[in-house]
Image: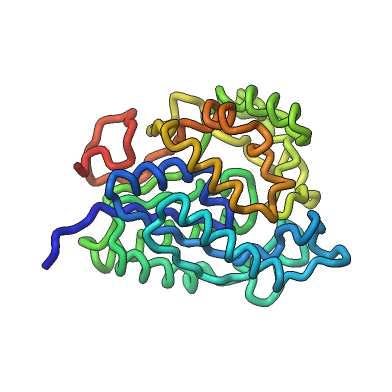
Amino acid sequence: MTDHVLTLMAVHAHPDDEATGTGGVLARYAAEGIRTILVTCTDGRCGDGPDGVKPGEPGHDPAAVVATRRVELEAACKVLGVSQLELLGYADSGMMGWPDNDAPGAFWRTPVEESAARVAELIRRHRPDVVVTYDENGFYGHPDHIMAHRVTMAAVAAVAEAAPDAAPKKLYWTTVPRSAMEEMGRVMRELGADWDAPDPSGEGGQSDSAQSDSGQADSAQSDSDQPPIGLPDEEITTWVDVKAFGPQKFEALAAHASQSENIFFLKMGLERFTEMMGVETFVRVRDDTDAALPEDDLFAGLR
C-alpha cells in the first residue's frame, strides 16, 4: 500500500468560484506537493453569454455558455495546478427567486441526500485530509452556494459515520474578515460595482447587490433578509498567506474570460489584486488534529 498523499478538496458551486476564495490555497498547496481536488457542482449556465448577454436576453444560449465555461474552468485548474476536477453537472440555479431555481436538474431543487451521496463517494475515493466549502448562507445567499454547503456537510457527516477512517480530518468554511469589507467595498465602488460594505455590527443584512455568476443582482430578497457577509476578525480561525501565488490566482480568474464583465477583482490589476486578495481566510468547523488556533495553514496538525 502506497503512502498517503496529503489531499485538499474544495467544493464549489460554479465555474470561477474556485479562483476567488480558494485560488490561492489551491495554488499554494499544489506547489507544496499536496494533491488538490476541485468539485464543481453546477454547469454555470446562468452565467454571461457573448458580450455579457444575460440569461433570458436574446443571444443567451445556455448550452453554449456551459460549453464555454467548461473550457475556462479546465484552463483555470491548469493554472492553479489542480490535480483532479470533479464535475457534478447540476444545472445552475440562478439567483434566489429566479425561475431557474425550479428548473429540471437545477442544483437548488435536487434533494440534498442525492447530491450528498455523490460527494460522499468522492470523499471516499479521494480521501481528502482537508475539505473546504461555504458557510450556511453560501457566503452571500446564492442558492447554489447554500446547496454546496448543505451537500458537503451532509457528505462529510455520512462518511464520518459509515467509514471514519475515510473522513476528512479538518473541514473549513470560506469567509472574509469584516475589517476588510470597508476597504473592499470602496475598491468595488471605485471599479463600478454597486457595493456597500456590510454593517460591522452584524445587525441587518448586506446591501451590496450581491452578484451571481451571471452578474445579476438578487431582486427577490430584500437586503434585510440577508445575513451580513464575513465575520469579525476574532471569529476567523485560519489566515493563509497566499501572496506568493497572487499571479496564479489572478490568471485563474482571468481564465474565466466570458464572465470578465462581472469579475471586478480583475480590474484592480495584478499588484493591487495581490495586496487585497493575498490572504485567504477560513473558519475551522471540524478538526481531529487539535491544532492550535488561530492557525496559518489548513494542514496545521497534519504535517
Vertical placement of residue 248 versus 192, above or below: below
- Percent across and percent down for residue 264 are 68, 39
Quadrant of the rendering where the N terminus is positioned: bottom left
Q: Residue at x 47, y 45 (%)?
A: 22
Residue 14, x across and y down, in percent: 59, 58
In the image, 123 versus 189, the foreground residue is: 189
Q: Residue at x 65, y 65 (%)?
A: 68
Tell which residue pokes out farthest to the bottom in this image: 104
Quarter holding the C terminus is: top left
What's the residue at 62%, 35% (across, down)? 228
Question: Quick one: 29 or 184, which is closer to the camera?
Answer: 29
Residue 36 image offset from top left, x and y in percent: 36, 55
Question: Residue reaching furthest right?
Answer: 58
Residue at the image point whose x is 31% and y is 55% from the top:
35
Q: Is residue 119 above or below residue 203?
A: below
Q: In the figure, is residue 74 to the left or right of 263? A: left
- Numbered marks: total: 0
Front-most of 287 and 45? 45
> In the image as oriented, which residue stretches furthest toward the left?
1
Which of the 4 quarters of the picture holds residue 139? top right
Q: Position of residue 208 (x, y in %)?
A: 73, 36
Q: How is the image coloured?
A: rainbow
